[in-house]
Image (cartoon, rainbow, N blue to C red):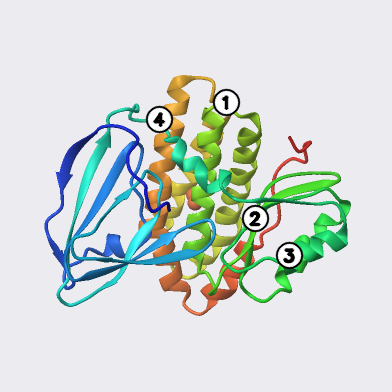
């Protein structure tokens, strides 16, 4: 999240929350959530101090906002209230960005992908050096032009429980992936929330007409749906999770897959964007927290398996 973030043009105030104090912060604000479509939120701290967390491609960033300070929060930016002082009070105002259409993904969402430094390697020893030199909280877009990439997952798995990857594309002799390491172990909601943000970033690029981003979108989404349907939801149902929720989410997955090849049509673009926004919000607000609560200690091992789930998609030339 950029410190100087502000809406690109004029906004219209849609409403403002009541004044929240530390005893009555809604649970939804304590979970990852994000302004959707062309909405912006403005967090205004009136008294005391509010500790916020921000889900970034790099890590979970912590920020204390004190009395008199405010923050703009852009579409797709995942944040949550982590704590507040006993004397703290804040409000949250919702604004509509009047310069973009209701279902237009702001270019800002693509920043999650676009702002990552690109590291290119062409030998196994360069790959090894790149990974060893990677600091926690500083992920990269790794472009590995070598056939040894199939072992990358194993390398990350052996690196101690904080590595993660989000593969973007692969071909017979190369791989492109977001690779990083978090400071602390990330839970399922952190990893999958970040995966959502990357999918939305790829969609923003795809809708701007970038063929590379469309390829990444297909691959990121395919893998994400396989993770949920093959790994996460079965474990959730075995732990007594809501069958109706899973059925509804899987139906929405089928709709997303049907809309994906139709991005040339404006109506399909709009439906895909709004469907994805609502779907991701439901999972982050309700489903992932319930999965974590039901799985208990077993959730840690599942989070590791998910963060290093293999590439799913077609091997196509890296663009
Ligand atoms: Fe899903
Ligand atoms: Fe999801």
Residue of label 3: 131
Question: Which dot, 2 or 4, sits closer to the camera?
Answer: 2
Q: Which quarter of the figure is the C terminus placed in? A: top right
- Side of 206 relative to 215 (left or right): left
- Residue 219 image offset from top left, x and y in percent: 65, 43
Residue of label 1: 209
Residue 201 visible in the snapshot: yes
Residue of label 2: 140
Residue of label 4: 104
Q: CA distance from mark 1 to mark 2?
A: 23 Å
Q: Earlier in the sequence, mark 1 or mark 3?
A: 3
At numbered mark 2, what does the secondary structure look like: helix, strand or loop? strand
- The residue shown at (65%, 55%) is 140
Q: CA distance from mark 2 to mark 4?
A: 27 Å
Question: Which dot, 3 or 4, sits closer to the camera?
Answer: 3
Q: Are marks 4 and 1 in contact (CB under 8 Å)?
A: no
Q: Say few, some or many: other residues with alpha carbon within 10 Å of mark 1 (under 14 / 14 to 19 / 20 or more).
A: few
- The residue shown at (87%, 60%) is 124
- Side of 154 relative to 182 (left or right): right
Q: Earlier in the sequence, mark 2 or mark 3?
A: 3
Q: Earlier in the sequence, mark 1 or mark 2?
A: 2
């Amino acid at each position: 999240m950029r410190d100087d973030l502000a809406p690109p043009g004029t906004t219209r105030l849609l409403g403002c929350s009541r004044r929240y104090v530390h005893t009555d912060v809604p649970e939804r604000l304590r979970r990852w959530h994000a302004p959707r479509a062309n909405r912006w939120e403005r967090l205004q701290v009136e008294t005391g101090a509010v500790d916020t967390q921000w889900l970034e491609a790099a890590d979970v960033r912590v920020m204390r906002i004190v009395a008199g300070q405010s923050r703009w929060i852009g579409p797709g930016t995942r944040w949550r209230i982590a704590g507040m002082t006993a004397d703290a009070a804040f409000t949250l105002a919702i604004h509509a960005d009047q310069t973009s259409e209701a279902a237009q993904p702001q270019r800002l969402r693509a920043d999650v992908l676009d702002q990552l430094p690109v590291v290119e390697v062409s030998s196994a020893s360069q790959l090894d050096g790149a990974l060893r030199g990677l600091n926690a909280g500083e992920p990269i877009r790794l472009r590995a032009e070598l056939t040894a990439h199939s072992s990358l997952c194993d390398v990350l798995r052996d690196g101690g429980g904080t590595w993660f990857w989000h593969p973007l594309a692969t071909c017979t002799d190369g791989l492109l992936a977001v690779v990083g390491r978090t400071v602390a172990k990330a839970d399922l909601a952190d990893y999958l929330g970040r995966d959502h943000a990357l999918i939305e970033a790829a969609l923003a690029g795809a809708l701007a007409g970038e063929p590379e981003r469309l390829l990444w979108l297909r691959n990121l989404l395919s893998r994400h749906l396989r993770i949920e349907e093959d790994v996460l939801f079965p474990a959730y149902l075995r732990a007594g999770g809501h069958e109706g929720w899973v059925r509804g989410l899987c139906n929405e997955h089928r709709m997303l897959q049907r809309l994906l090849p139709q991005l040339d049509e404006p109506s399909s673009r709009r439906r895909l964007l709004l469907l994805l926004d609502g779907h991701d919000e439901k999972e982050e607000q309700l489903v992932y927290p319930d999965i974590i609560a039901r799985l208990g200690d077993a959730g840690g091992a599942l989070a590791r398996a998910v963060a290093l789930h293999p590439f799913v998609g077609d091997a196509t030339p890296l663009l």
